[in-house]
Amino acid sequence: MGEAVIKRDTRMNADTAPLLQVNDLSIGFGDQPPIITDVNFSINRGETLALVGESGSGKTITCRSLLRVLPRAAVIHSGTAVFDPKASAPVDLFNLSEKDLRDVRGDRISMIFQEPMHSLSPLHRIGHQVAEVLTLHRGHSRTSAKVEVLEKFRRVGFVDPERAFAAYPFELSGGMRQRAMIAMAMIARPELLIADEPTTALDVTTQAQVLELIKGLQEETGMAVIFVTHDLGVVANIADQVCVLRKGRVMESGPTDIVIGAPAHGYTKKLLAAAPAIPHSAEPSKARPVVDPILQLEGINKTFVSRAGTFFGKNRAVQAVQNVSLTVERGKTFAIVGESGSGKSTVANIALGATSADAGGEIRYWAEKGALPVDVAHLDASERRSFQREAQMVFQDPFSSLSPRMQIIDILTEPLRIHGIGTRKEQKERAAELLEKVGLDKNMLRRFPHAFSGGQRQRLSIARALALNPSLLVCDEPTSALDLSVQMQVLELLEKIRDDFGLSYLFISHDLAVVARIADEVAVMRQGQIVEQAAPDVLFTAPRHPYTKALIAACLEADVSQKINLQTVALGAGDPHTWPEDYAMQGSSLPPLIETEPGHLVRVNP
C-alpha cells in the first residue's frame, strides 16, 4: 500500500480541457475497506486511454462506476467524474439522478462489455437489440432504426447484415457477437466509448480486425475511448495514454510510448517482462529425424454430424479434422496452434482416446523407448486403463475442471483411488508431495477450489494430472485464462516439470508467443488441416503459408514500434481462394502438405 505512484505528463495539450476527469475515486463493498483507492485519470476527445492491470486490479469496476452499473453491494465512497467540463452545464456522473444518467448511458457514453453472450439478451434478435438504442435515445421509428442498424452492421464487417439483424445471439460466432456489441455501442455516435476487454475472447486475427474497426470508427467520429485490458500488446497498438492499476491503486500513468517504452514503476516492468514475444530473428535450426517417438497420429480424420434444425431437414456432415499426421518426441513439446474451430482440441481428444477418429487412421503410443507401440484406437478396457495412467490432460479452464464440492486432498487422490494405487496414508502423502511439486503448500490440502486464485487452480490441475506419474501430458490451452505474470509462472512450472521428469507434451494453444517459448515443434492448423509445420525458430522467422503469416502479423507485442499489419492479416485469414496461387484452394481442395526444406512442411503446390 506504500508504493509510490509514478505519473508522467498525461495531457497532449495542457490548454485542452479533458472530456472526462476522474479525481480521487474510492469504491468499496459494504463496511469493508475500499478496493479502489484514490484513482485519478483523464481523457481528451479523440484520445484512447488504456486501463491496464491483472485480474482483480480494479479496471472493470472503475469503468462500471462511471455509468453506475455496479454490483448492488458496491459503494462509491468518494470522488468525482466530471464529464464534458467545457459544456455550459458539465455533469458529475456520480451525482446525476438515475433519470438523467439513463439519458447519458448508451447515448453520450457507451460501453462494450467483455463477454457479449452475457450482455446480449438470448430471447431477442440481434438487430432489435441494437435498434433499441435509436428508438430510446433518438426517437427513431422501427423502420428508420432498422435502416441505420443495417448500415452500421455493414460498417462493422457483417457480410450479410439482414441475416445478422434477424439472428439470435447463439446463432453468431464470438467474433460476430462482439461486432454486434460494437455496432450497438457506436450506433448513437457516443462521445465516449468504454471498451471492457472487448477482444479477450477473440482469435488473434479477429482481434486485429476488431481493433482496427474501433480505431477507424474513432477517427470517423472523434470519440474518446477508454480501453480496459491486461494485454500490453493491445495497449502498444491502440493507446495514446496508459494508466496502470494494481489492487485498486494507480501505479503509473502517462503517454504510451513512455510507459511501455521506458517504464519507471516496478510493477509495470514486471508486466512487460511477463509478456511473451514471438522471435523476429534466430539461427535456423537443423532438421533431424525423430528417433524416439512417444505418440504418433497418422492419417487422422474426424467427421461430426450436425443435426437438422427441422423434422424434414437433412443432417449435415462437418469434417473437423482432415488427414492429420504428427509425431511427438519423447521428452519434447509438440505444439498445435490455430484459431477457434481449427480442430486442434479435437486432435488432442483423439490422441487421448477420448474421441474416436474416423476409420482408417492410426494412433500409436510407445510406453518406453524400443517398446512395441500400442494402438490407442483399439484398446480393450484393461489396456485403456493402463494407457490412461500414462497419458493425462491439463484442461483450459481451471475453474470448471476442478469439482467445487471436493477438497483438494480428494481431488488429488481421486486418480489413485480409481486405479487402486496405495493405501489411504500413501495417497495422502502423494497428494502433499504433488502440491509441493507445483509450488503450493501441503497445508492447503483441506481447502476447496474456490479458496484459490486462477493461477493456483491451474497448478492444482497440473498436480492432478501428475498424480499417476504419466509420461505424456496433453495441455489444452492451459494458460489462456490467466494473467500475464501468472501465465509466465505456469509456463515456467510446465518447463521445469517436463525437464525434471522427462515428460512429453502435446501442447494446444492459439497464442503463438506462448508456443514460441515452450515448443520444440509447431504445427499450424486451419479448418481441420495442418497448413504448415516446423521448429519454432524456423516457423516464426521464415513462415511460408499465408495463414501462418496472418497469425504472426495479428500477434500484438508490447512494443510501440510493432504495429498490426492488417493487410497481411486480412489476406491469410480470408478466403483460401484469394491466397497466392501456390497456396490457393483448387476447387474444393487445398494443395498437399509437402516438405519444402528439411523439417519444414508447407501446404503448397509442388
Image (cartoon, rainbow, N blue to C red):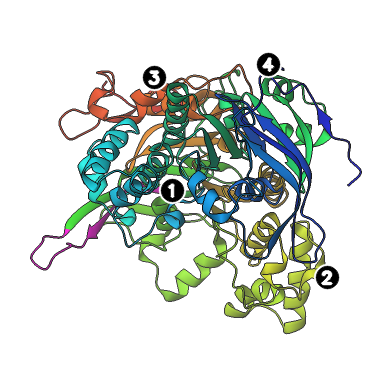
Q: Earlier in the sequence, mark 4 or mark 1?
A: 4
Q: Nearer the viewer, mark 2 or mark 1?
A: 2
Q: Which numbered disc covers residue 13?
A: 4
Q: Secondary structure at mark 2?
A: helix
User: What residue sits right under mark 2 in the picture?
Assistant: 443
Q: Is residue 408 above or below residue 517?
A: below
The structure residue drawn at horizontal position 71% and vertical position 59%, both measured from the top left corner, is 75
Q: Nearer the viewer, mark 2 or mark 3?
A: 3
State the CA–CA distance, disc 1 to disc 3.
37 Å
Answer with the quarter of the image where residue 416 lies: bottom right
Q: Secondary structure at mark 1?
A: strand
Q: Earlier in the sequence, mark 2 or mark 1?
A: 1
Q: Residues within 10 Å of mark 4 (few under 14, many from 20)?
A: few
Which amino acid does the dot numbered 2 rest on? Asn
Q: Which numbered disc covers residue 296?
A: 1
Q: Position of residue 304 (x, y in %)?
A: 26, 57
Q: Earlier in the sequence, mark 1 or mark 3?
A: 1
Q: Write the start and end of the magenta stretch as one range.
A: 297-315
The structure residue drawn at horizontal position 72% and vertical position 77%, both measured from the top left corner, is 427
Which amino acid does the dot numbered 1 rest on? Gln
Report if the CB atoms under discs 4 and 1 are less than 8 Å apart: no
Q: Earlier in the sequence, mark 2 or mark 3?
A: 2
The structure residue drawn at horizontal position 47% and vertical position 26%, both measured from the top left corner, is 218
Q: Is residue 213 above or below residue 82?
A: above
Answer with the quarter of the image where residue 590 lies: top left
Inspect the magenta stretch and tell me whether residue 469 lies in it. no
User: What residue sits right under mark 3 in the picture?
Assistant: 567
